[in-house]
């Protein structure tokens, strides 16, 4: 962990998810597969690790303060609301749950008044974990996208918890998406892979 702190201060923790990628292959379902088995290049593997690896600052914050409700700030549609960053749940001022409606392809995202739950969680947690980087994101929000590290969980409200969502530079996210599409095409063309079905638990 000390090595991570010294060398990857604001980047993803490349010491996690060493050789595996979480995939959502719509014809086979979700699962985990080895990057070595997929034959990814060194650069492609680095992209995957950068995208799928845990954000060190966010992890540290959630592990020490994730049990606390966070007042939601800088979001005019959710004034006086609170966020449970571990459960990915929003509460109003009376501590009643604020429901987000399932939307998008196969109900894969949750939205309320134009606000996506996964983006909200990622931004609110980042504000507490690394305020400087938060303002960089807010100042150029179109250059960043919120990513679900385990895509099989995004159809469930708890899949939008702070451990599973991560803000990424849009160019990096596109590179990652291109790699996933490449894998999907290969599988569709007959490539055999050992897709290990995931266990549905909160991600850390």
Image: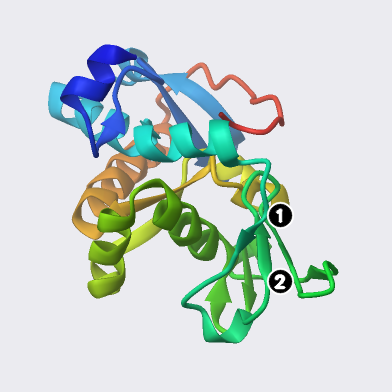
At x 36%, y 41%, the residue is 180
* Rendered location of residue 49, percent (x, y): 30, 28
Q: In this figure, which residue is indicated by the disc labeled 1?
A: 157
* Rendered location of residue 9, percent (x, y): 22, 33
Quadrant in which residue 98 is drawn: bottom right
Nearer-N-terminus badge (1/2): 2
How packed mark 2 is, by other alpha carbons closer than 10 Å (few <14, some 14-19, many 20 or more), is some
Q: In this figure, which residue is indicated by the disc labeled 2?
A: 100
> 8 or 33: which is nearer to us?
8
Q: Is residue 55 visible?
A: yes
* Rendered location of residue 12, percent (x, y): 30, 34
Q: Is residue 86 above or below residue 12?
A: below
Q: Is residue 143 above or below residue 193?
A: below
The reply to whether discs 1 and 2 touch (Cβ–Cβ < 8 Å) is yes
* Rendered location of residue 135, percent (x, y): 28, 65
> 60 or 110: which is nearer to us?
60
Q: Is residue 40 above or below residue 180?
A: above
Question: Which secondary structure, mark 2?
Answer: loop
**Which image quarter holds the C terminus?**
top right
At x 29%, y 23%, the residue is 14
- Report whether 8 appears left or right of 74: left
In 3D space, how far apart are the residues under numbered discs 1 and 2 (Cα atoms)? Answer: 9 Å
> 23 or 64: which is nearer to us?
64
Question: Which secondary structure, mark 1?
Answer: helix
């Amino acid at each position: 962990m000390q090595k991570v702190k010294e060398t990857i201060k604001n980047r993803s923790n490349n010491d996690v998810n060493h050789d595996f990628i979480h995939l959502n292959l719509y014809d086979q379902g979700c699962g985990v597969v080895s990057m070595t088995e997929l034959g990814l290049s060194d650069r492609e593997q680095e992209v995957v690790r950068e995208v799928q690896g845990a954000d060190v600052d966010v992890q540290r914050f959630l592990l020490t303060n994730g049990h606390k409700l966070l007042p939601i700030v800088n979001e005019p549609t959710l004034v006086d609301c609170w966020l449970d960053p571990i459960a990915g749940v929003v509460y109003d001022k009376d501590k009643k749950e604020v429901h987000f409606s399932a939307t998008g392809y196969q109900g894969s995202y949750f939205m309320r008044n134009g606000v996506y739950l996964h983006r909200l969680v990622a931004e609110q947690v980042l504000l507490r974990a690394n305020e400087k980087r938060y303002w960089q994101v807010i100042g150029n929000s179109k250059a960043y996208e919120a990513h679900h590290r385990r895509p099989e969980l995004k159809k469930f409200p708890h899949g939008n918890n702070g451990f599973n969502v991560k803000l990424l530079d849009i160019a990096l996210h596109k590179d990652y998406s291109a790699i996933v599409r490449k894998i999907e095409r290969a599988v569709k063309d007959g490539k055999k892979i050992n897709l290990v079905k995931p266990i549905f638990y909160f991600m850390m």
